[in-house]
Amino acid sequence: MRKFRIGFFVVIGILCLTALVYAAIPRVINYQGKLTDKDDNPLSGNFLVTFRFYDVEKAGQAMWEEGHILNIKNGVFNVSMGSVKPLEIDFNKDLWLGMEVASDGEMTPRIKLASSVYALNAKSIDMISSSQLLRNDVDSVMSGSLTLKKDLVLKGSPVGPSKIVLADMQGREYYLWVDTLGNLRLKQGLPASETDGSVIIKEKTGKLSTHFMQSITLLLLLVAVFILALILYSSKKK
């Protein structure tokens, strides 16, 4: 005859069912619940409780199983599932949790896992908050400096080239990009087209920029002055 009847299983509520992810396997699920007897009296004492995960609500084969000797006080217990046997199962589908106290048979109904357990690694990665992570599918905003130890590569799309946006303290934005001809351009404010901006570096053939021409002219002038000074010095010595 069973020591515990089906009425033994009274879960007052799942107080906590959250998944914790460490830097490496094993993954651990912290589970807290409450057990009472058939008369709804909370249990106290040491009990062997076996936990099982299934991919079906009834019957089926357990995908994972782990036993714990729990010290239950006033019906409340805490357990870290996965601390004995790694939770090497796929959480990307519906799963149900089955429990058995001693050898009384598994209690029914099984508990379907809530969305919290499927959110493995959703809030933090290696103790880094999700708000500290950059994403490429949405606009990300971060504060502080960002240091890259490798190249930062921006690739354009058929719509237009990728742009680097720099903003000053007054909120003015400056766009820097490379057009389809290979010219590096800069413009204050949003460019209307890929050529709507001043050319900083011109690729291939074409007219040199005014700034470049001014720099070359100044350099040639200095060289000419230096040569003239040498000629006058030589003439004076003679």
Image (spheres, rainbow, N blue to C red):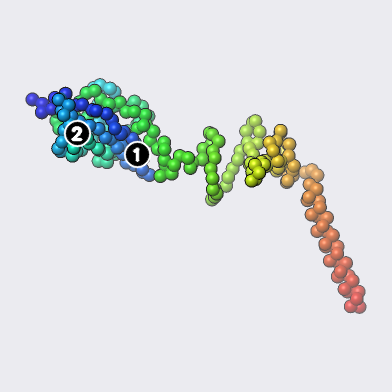
Instruction: State which mark lies toward you, 2 or 1.
Output: 2
**As drawn, is 171 to the left or to the right of 99?**
right
Q: Which residue: 15% across, 36% down?
A: 44
The residue under label 1 is: 20
Q: Which residue: 88% across, 67% down?
A: 228
The kind of residue tagged 2 is Gly
Q: Quadrant of residue 126?
A: top left
Q: Quadrant of residue 67?
A: top left
Percent position of residue 156, x then y = 63, 36
**As drawn, is 17 to the left or to the right of 137?**
left
Q: Quadrant of the C terminus?
A: bottom right
The residue under label 2 is: 75
Percent position of residue 221, x then y = 84, 60
Q: Quadrant of the N terminus?
A: top left
Percent position of residue 9, x then y = 19, 26
Depth check, front residue: 174 or 97: 174
Residue that protrudes farthest toward the top in the picture: 58
Vertical relation: 37 (above or below) 217: above
Assign a secondary structure to mark 2.
loop
Percent position of residue 100, x then y = 19, 30
Q: Which residue: 51% across, 37% down?
A: 135
Please indicate, yes or no, whether residue 160 appears anywhere in the rendered image: yes
Local crowd size for mark 1, using a 10 Å CA cut-off: few (<14), some (14–19), many (≥20) = some
Q: Which residue: 73% across, 36% down?
A: 196
